[in-house]
Image (spheres, helix red, strand yellow):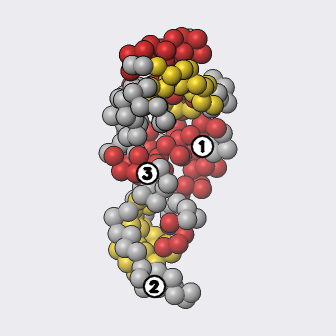
């Protein structure tokens, strides 16, 4: 089975430099540079599965630096960096793959929590004001899922260019308006024109989100 070339790929704090000889189990090994400046040789499967995230300094810092590695904010920070830097992460194509990056200051969790503070409640997660820009203090805030849905731009599958408005799937020339509330899609009606459907959507936003 051919070995996937990991050179240049980044896995949490490790950047792959070059291939090294296989280990005793015949698995491919790679020389990696850690963010702390050290170099280490890591088995490829440990990188791609997330088993090894640094040269060892990461675990030390978790214990001695901030002591918040089990907090919700730390998990948000970790997932934020994964989707922007780890090409193997499931959401990378929507973030790092599109050029969305984490600012240098937020490479350290201490700076991230100092800028963002704690989540107001468990329902909140990180949101960007401008989806074309990356994760940085001026562009981020804690938001609920409802607020995120409100700020969401039309997806690639949108046929009208308006969030919450789509052509009727069975009746030609008709348009359906809908809105997501607490994770569920709510039907707002079927209309003759896009304008009427868009108005219903706006009224739904006032009713359910305002």
Image location of residue 120, percent across then percent down? 63, 23
Residue labelled with disc 1: 75
Q: Residue at x 59, y 30 (%)?
A: 185
Q: Residue at x 55, y 88 (%)?
A: 24
Front-most of 135 and 146? 146
Give whichever of discs 3 and 2 has the lower sequence position: 2
Query: In the structure shown, which secondary structural element does the residue marked by tag 2 occupy?
Result: loop
- Quadrant location of the C terminus? top right
Image location of residue 137, percent across then percent down? 42, 28
Give whichever of discs 1 and 2 has the lower sequence position: 2
Q: Is residue 188 above or below residue 12?
A: above
Q: CA distance from mark 3 to mark 2?
A: 25 Å
- Quadrant location of the N terminus? bottom left
Q: Quadrant of residue 183?
A: top right
Q: Quadrant of residue 157?
A: top left
User: Is the residue under label 3 in contact with that under label 1 (CB below 8 Å)?
Assistant: no
Q: Residue at x 67, y 44 (%)?
A: 70
Front-most of 64 and 209? 209
Residue labelled with disc 2: 1
Q: In screen coordinates, is 27 left or right of 99?
A: right
Q: Is residue 141 above or below residue 79?
A: above
Residue labelled with disc 3: 92
Give whichever of discs 1 and 3 has the lower sequence position: 1
Marks 1, 3: nearer the viewer: 3
- The mark tally for this picture is 3
Q: In this rendering, does residue 137 appear at all?
A: no
Q: CA distance from mark 1 to mark 2?
A: 35 Å
Q: Residue at x 47, y 50 (%)?
A: 91
Q: Given the current orientation, which residue lies at the most extreme front position?
A: 171
User: Is the residue under label 2 in contact with that under label 3 (CB below 8 Å)?
Assistant: no
Q: In this rendering, does residue 160 appear at all?
A: yes
């Amino acid at each position: 089975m051919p070995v996937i070339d990991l050179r240049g790929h980044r896995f949490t704090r490790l950047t792959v430099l070059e291939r090294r000889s296989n280990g005793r189990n015949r698995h491919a090994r790679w020389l990696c540079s850690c963010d702390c400046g050290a170099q280490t040789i890591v088995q490829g499967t440990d990188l791609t599965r997330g088993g090894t995230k640094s040269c060892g300094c990461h675990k030390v810092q978790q214990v001695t630096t901030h002591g918040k590695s089990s907090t919700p904010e730390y998990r948000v920070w970790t997932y934020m960096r994964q989707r922007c830097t780890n090409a193997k992460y499931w959401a990378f194509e929507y973030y790092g793959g599109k050029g969305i990056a984490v600012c240098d200051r937020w490479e350290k969790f201490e700076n991230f929590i100092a800028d963002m503070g704690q989540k107001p409640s468990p329902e909140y997660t990180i949101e960007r004001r401008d989806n074309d820009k990356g994760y940085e203090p001026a562009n981020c805030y804690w938001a609920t899922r409802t607020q995120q849905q409100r700020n969401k731009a039309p997806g690639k599958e949108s046929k009208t260019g308006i969030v919450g408005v789509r052509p009727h799937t069975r009746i030609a020339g008709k348009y359906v308006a809908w809105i997501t509330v607490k994770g569920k899609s709510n039907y707002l009606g079927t209309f003759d024109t896009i304008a009427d459907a868009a108005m219903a959507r706006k009224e739904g936003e006032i009713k359910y989100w305002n």
